[in-house]
Image (cartoon, rainbow, N blue to C red):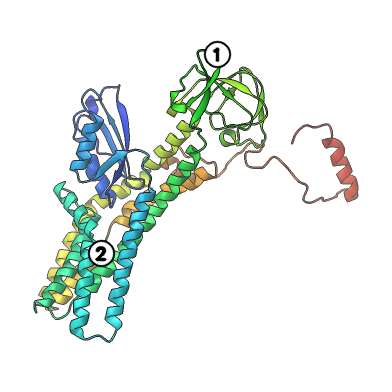
Amino acid sequence: GAAGGAGPQAAEAPAATEELCFAVSGMSCVNCARTIERTVGRLPGVAEARVNFAVEEGRVRFDPRRCSPDEIFRAVREAGYTPAPSGAASRARERRERRLFLFALGLAAAAFATLHLPLPPAWATGLLLLLATANQLGPGLDYYRGAANALRAGAANMDVLVALGIAASYGFSLLYLAGVTDHPTFETAIYLVCFIRLGKLLEERARGRASRALTTLASLQVDRARRRSPEGGWEEVPLAAVAVGDRIQVRPGERIPIDGVVVAGESAVDEQIATGEPLPVRRGPGDPVIGGTLNHTGVIEVEVSRTGEDAFLGQVIALVRAAQARPAPIQRLADRVSAVFVPAVVAVAALAFAAWLLAGAGLAVAVTRSVAVLVVACPCALGLATPTAILVASGLALGRGLLFKSGAALEALARVDRVVFDKTGTLTTGRPQVVAVEAAGGRTEAEVVALAAAVEWPSSHP
């Protein structure tokens, strides 16, 4: 994702600002994210606007006295994109990309067959025209919409390059039908859209993996709790209805719904998700317990100390989301470079067209060379590589119990030369096994094992 885009009012923003987190759909590259940042950043009261293209998420810090979430959403829509409450599932986007790719792949396969079957030239050209037109109005239509939105916002993104490339190829082929050029290039636009759609599908799958890792963590949160009622009994209520100071009951085999302090009862609690400790720990009156951990042996009564995003699991999920959204230093450099990349590529393509035309190579060669410049110089690799790497790495690490505070922290790991861990089972299962015995000093293996057993017998260490 891209960073920046703070409005001109950033310096005047009061201390009491709020942060709005929301999903954004309709983006095709990092320049789309910058377009949204600039548009939202111009609103009065907006202190900072950040949009992460990799996870399709926006974060806006604003003064609620001068700006509202509705105004922010309206600005996003005016920029040509669709905002939605945060937490919208990515699976629908992945399904859509899969459908569009399969559509494009079918068109590409049909075009390939048309070119290699012994068909009369007029039939082949007619079929390619139908396939290319379906390509323009189907899987290729998004790029025209994205280019129009970007140009209306005074920006140039990947969609501009793709739209120019496929429009030039399709238009050149229409000129052939009019007798202006000597051969059509319908298949070029079809193949191009197919390859780009494949890239978009792979991007969505990468997003989906990271998103599902967060979903797995969030699934540790139960949605209901057993709360003490004013009459003194216990009632099951939605977790959202539980407040700080309420008392809840947790029975053996249940997950502790929310952070709190034990006020009655004793139990062994599996806190592995929070501390990495493989063995349950004893918890009794006065001991803190963590939401999402598993109660093993006894019934405990817990007084709630933290709820919602202030609780342990809420903080962990927020930490991972922030790490995925906050750009690393190398990503900021890539964003700055890609911001001027698209206009430069369009200029180079125009120069290539003019140079080949002036050199007498003909219109067909000039168009082909300029389209080649447009389609191979797409800045997606430059703008997407770093955020996607951070996104996938943090998602995979989360699945293995590792949390990164930011992309910068992840990048700093390249300079780490020593890592120190404790020996309490954080990296191990806490169940050591003897795998080899080496006897020294003339003793037999049996004697060494007997001596070791004598030393270990009075110890309670695992």
Q: Is residue 299 left or right of residue 83?
A: right
Q: Considering only vertical position in the picture, is 393 above or below 198?
A: above
Residue at the location (17% across, 80% down)?
183
Category of crowding for the residue at label 2, using alpha-carbon neighbours closer than 10 angstroms: few (below 14), some (14–19), many (at least 20) = many
Q: Is residue 101 left or right of residue 308?
A: left
Residue at the location (66% across, 22% down)?
266
The one of 135 and 156 positioned closer to us in this rendering: 135
Q: Considering only vertical position in the picture, is 448 above or below 259?
A: below
In this rendering, the count of numbered labels is: 2
Secondary structure under tag 1 reads: loop
1 or 2: mark nearer the eye: 1
Q: Which image quadrant is residue 165 in?
A: bottom left
The one of 332 and 254 positioned closer to us in this rendering: 254
The one of 233 and 405 positioned closer to us in this rendering: 233
Looking at the image, can residue 332 be seen?
Answer: yes
> Of the residues under marks 1 and 2, which one precedes in the sequence?
1
**x and y percentages locating residue 44 in the rendered image:** 18, 29
Looking at the image, can residue 195 be seen?
Answer: no
Q: Quadrant of the C terminus?
A: top right
Three-letter code, disc 1: Gly
Task: Point out the residue furthest to the top here.
Answer: 231
Q: Which residue is mark 2?
A: 375
Q: Which residue is mark 1?
A: 232
